[in-house]
Amino acid sequence: MSKNVHDFFAPTYGDARQRFLAAAAKSGAVVTKHIHPLKGPSGEELALDVAAFGPLDAKRVFVTMSATHGGEGFLGSAAQVGWLTEGRYRDLPDDTAVVLMHAVNPHGFAWLRRVTEGNIDLNRNFLDYAEPVPEKPEYDKLHAAICPDDWTESARASADNILDKYAEEHGQKVLNRVVMGGQFSRPDGVFYGGTAPTWSRTTILAVLDAHTAEAEHIALIDFHTGLGPPGHGECYIVGNEGDPGVEKANDVWGTDGVSVLAASGSRSAHDGYNLTGIARELAPVAFYGNTLEFGTHPLETIYRALRADNWLHVHGDLNSDFARSVKADLKEAFCPDSSEWRETVYQRCMEVWQRGMTGLASL
Ligand SMILES: [Zn+2]
């Protein structure tokens, strides 16, 4: 393993952006910058930056996105910077374009948050807002326990007690689904999908529109961290087993380490799922979306970090020692400070990326 892998991982959003833009400039990519209306915590400019290769009228387009969940962007950014730095853009298959979208949620990346400005989970924000938003009565019932007004030890203990009881009664999986499935009624809560498209959603769709004018097949990797066994990179595609669309997606991504999230039911993708929304927007063009998810720490640790961050932004003081400790926990939850983890996940990113490029070329 080349020691350069560690150089692909930036310590902050601003640094990640500089590394991406420098590597993109060296590669000769066509670069476009989409500036976010807000600034980062140090007053830095925020942007979704794009590096594109290949013909604008390509029939096949391969896309990667980093930082859908803001602070999870360290790994996706490293994969994109590494792919550029290692010169993997050379020798692209015929009639194929590659589009790298860096920091699709730059606000969350810069502020070390999973969410966008407005506390919105971008991966629950791709509903068709012409329809009424889903109601989530179970979330509403548990909201006060998931997001207690106080974050003292005793307040947390009594809130956790309520959640533990719910899990005992209904099962942990049901509780996870209630918490994480997406909710649209509590802007101060977790996994809130919002009631309108965010800047990030609108900008992602505009970038895709600009780069896929003649596309017939579009494959996309959306990089995530925080769920699943540490270091393992599982691919999730959305559809129903046996659907021709799922079989085609398996032609692109393979079946090894690839799970199918049903379009509905208990194993389904969450409401407002980004890749479902993108597929809907791109239809009838064939779209093979892949949520590539890497575990970091146990789920309780991740939940705890996300709930603390939510409390901090709703009730707390961003210039406090508490804030610094919450952000340090989040950084570790999103991107562990472990050489072994970083080397393993980077290698897996390149493997999936290469597999997808080969699979797309074979269609
Ligand atoms: Zn994520």
Image (cartoon, rainbow, N blue to C red):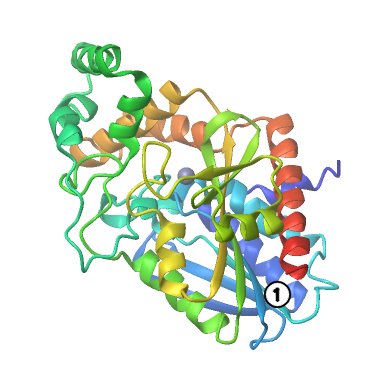
Q: Is residue 140 left or right of residue 250?
A: left
Query: Residue 62 appears at what percent x and percent y?
Result: 65, 68
User: Total number of numbered labels?
Assistant: 1
Question: In which quarter of the view is residue 249 placed?
Answer: bottom right
- Taking the spot 75% from the left edge, 79% from the top edge, the residue there is 28
58 displayed left or right of 163: right
Pick the front one: 80 or 260: 260
**Residue located 25% across and 18% down the image:** 163
Query: Is 3 located above or below residue 222 in the figure?
Result: above
Q: Which residue is mark 1?
A: 25
Q: Is residue 153 above or below residue 259?
A: above
Is 131 left or right of 65, judged from the image as shown?
Answer: left
Work out whether residue 134 or residue 29 is closer to the camera in this orientation and state it. Answer: 134
The kind of residue on which mark 1 rests is Ala
Percent coordinates x, y for residue 4 in the rendering: 80, 48
Residue 111 location in percent, x, y?
40, 49
Please, is residue 309 above or below residue 199 in the view?
above
Density class for disc 1 (Cα within 10 Å; few <14, some 14-19, many ≥20) is some
Q: From the image, which quarter does the N terminus lie in?
A: top right
Q: Residue at x 36, y 34 (%)?
A: 306
Determine whether the residue tagged by mark 1 lies in a helix, strand or loop: helix
Q: Is residue 6 visible?
A: no
Which residue is at a point 45% across and 34% down the rendered structure image?
330
Image quarter of the C terminus:
bottom right
Q: Eyeballing the image, is 177 above or below 253?
A: above
Q: Nearer the viewer, residue 130 or 87?
A: 130
- Can residue 326 be seen? yes
Percent coordinates x, y for residue 212 in the rendering: 56, 81
Q: Quadrant of residue 286?
A: bottom right
The residue lying toward the viewer, choosing from 154 and 349, is: 349
